[in-house]
Image: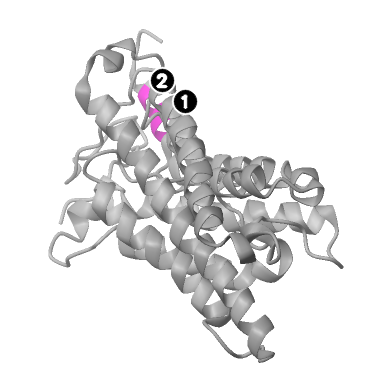
Amino acid sequence: MAKDVEVAERGSFSAKDYQDLPPVPLFDSVELTKWSFYRAVIAEFIATLLFLYITVLTVIGYKSQIDLGGDACGGVGILGIAWAFGGMIFILVYCTAGISGGHINPAVTFGLFLARKVSLVRAVMYIVAQSLGAIAGVGLVKAFQKSYYTKYGGGANELAEGYSTGVGLAAEIIGTFVLVYTVFSATDPKRSARDSHVPVLAPLPIGFAVFMVHLATIPITGTGINPARSLGAAVIYDKKKAWDDQWIFWVGPFIGAAIAAFYHQFILRAGAVKALGSFRSNPHN
């Protein structure tokens, strides 16, 4: 099997058995004239709406069950909540990947934008659609669970008592890094070429990444790693604590996504080394 591009001592490159897509234009106004672009934006809105509806409803339902029954082990438990988040991401990424790429998360969109996988226009529109979808999804939860919604916290992300702001921010950075790093790895064209003999379903590892991160960070921040999810819950719940901690659930995920994009593109894929080799091999530079 042929190897990946390697920079030789004299600046030459070996052949590779996969094709990297060229970086998308930073500003691509042509997208605004295409129906496929608006279809993708709508898909992101609906997917995020469904994601928040199912997951927040699961959180509130679990809290009401243990409150009424008095059994901390009753209901779905933290494990079930983590499964709800991971399972919904698996389902929704599977359903929307061919339409919008299945981001369903501003941090994922931001990371892919930094890696030049999506244009600035698409990134901004996706983030707006995801945020509005999250608000609408939590709004449906409140409409269906009026008696429980406020009483059980509205599914809002808040820093748990006993944890410092620094710990909460670090948890969000690391958790988002795990997610976005998994997204890059699962959608890497090099992996698709090398593992073509083994069916690799990209949404599965992405869903599992969300599941595992929730298991680790629910006790700390309730697990954000998705600014739209945190914003949607805060807007509908509208309590001071949720708004005071809101910045953690934007700054942390965006930092984590940026680190993941840099790590995958410039370290694992040796983007910086390839660029340097190309520069050295060009006698006109």
The answer to whether the residues at label 2 and label 1 have Cβ atoms under 8 Å apart is: yes
Q: Which residue is mark 2?
A: 121
Three-letter code, disc 1? Val
Is 215 contained in the magenta span? no
Q: Residue at x 58, y 89 (%)?
A: 74
Q: Which residues are magenta?
A: 273-278
Quarter containing the C terminus: top left
Instruction: Name the element at disc 2.
Output: helix
What distance separates the C-alpha of mark 2 from that of mark 1?
A: 5 Å
Q: In the rendering, at what x and y percent does residue 201 appear? A: 24, 62
- Which residue occupies the foreground of this view, 7 or 52? 52
Label 1 neighbourhood size at 10 Å, few (<14), some (14-19), many (20+)?
some
Three-letter code, disc 2? Val
Is 277 contained in the magenta span? yes
Q: Which residue is mark 1?
A: 124
- Against 266, residue 211 (above or below) is below
Q: Residue at x 55, y 72 (%)?
A: 61
Which residue reaches farthest top?
Answer: 284
- Which residue occupies the foreground of this view, 280 or 147? 147
Q: In the rendering, at what x and y percent does residue 8 appear? A: 33, 38
Q: In the rendering, at what x and y percent does residue 267 appear? A: 49, 45
Which residue reaches farthest front?
Answer: 147
Q: In the rendering, at what x and y percent does residue 126 appear? A: 42, 32
Main SS, magenta residues: helix
